[in-house]
Image: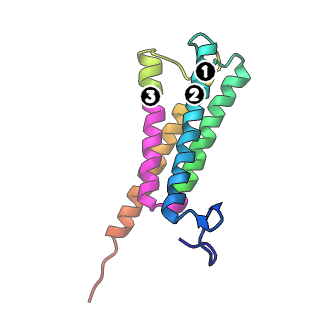
Amino acid sequence: MTFGGFSPTIPLSPGRSLTEYELHEVTKSKISRHIKNVFITFHSLTLKNEGKANKLQTQAERIGAVSFGVCVLMILMAIFRQFFSKSFFRGFTVATGLFLSFDIVVFHWIFQLHRITNGSEANWLEPILVMAGTTFVGYGVIKENSDNKSRTEFTVTL
């Protein structure tokens, strides 16, 4: 593998450097070490709190956590829209909408298994997310149906 006309090597000793395969193995080793360190750090934080995960205490922290999730979702949607087909993006949009709507209505409201947050902000956050999910489903289905209709209405006469 070359980058700008040169092959990446790591000097080890005079006259010896890593091959591409060895470089790949070193990189894999470093990545796995970082993943292991993250896991150990998280596990040690959990142990320090006597097995309890760090819970968000204030309303602003909980809303910030939900906002972070929404931002990650929007970034993924932008990536999928840019790099994948229209049908894939619309399918992802419909799936996201179904998850938002179905999960909140069935598991949060009907069965009352959990809420999106532990505070009173869930009373207004959840209906907003159900409406957003319904909008996602509607957008994906309507756009896909209109695209399919425009493809099937095209006829060629000779």
Q: Which residues are magenta?
A: 81-103
Query: 83 and 130: which one is in front?
Result: 83
What residue does disc 1 label?
Answer: 44
Q: Residues within 10 Å of mark 1 (few under 14, many from 20)?
A: few
Q: What residue do we see at 50% from left, 54% from top?
A: 25
- In the rendered image, residue 89 lying in the magenta stretch gets the answer yes
Quadrant of the image occupied by residue 105: top left
Q: What residue is shown with label 3?
A: 103
Q: Nearer the viewer, residue 88 or 12?
A: 12
Q: Is residue 136 left or right of residue 71?
A: left
- Is residue 7 found left or right of 59 in the rendered image? left
Give me the C-alpha separation between circle 1 and circle 2.
6 Å
Say which amino acid is labelled 3. Asp
Residue 117 visible in the snapshot: no
Going by the numbered disc 1, the residue's amino acid type is: Ser
Of marks 1 and 3, the one in the foreground: 1
Q: Amino acid at mark 2?
A: Ile
Marks 1 and 3, the one that precedes in the sequence: 1
Q: Residue furthest front?
A: 14
Q: Earlier in the sequence, mark 3 or mark 2?
A: 2
Check disc 2 and report the residue beneath it.
Answer: 40
**Does dot 3 land on a helix, a strand or a loop?**
helix
Element type where label 1 sits in the image: helix
The extreme left residue here reads 158
Asked if labels 2 and 1 touch by Cβ distance under 8 angstroms, the answer is yes
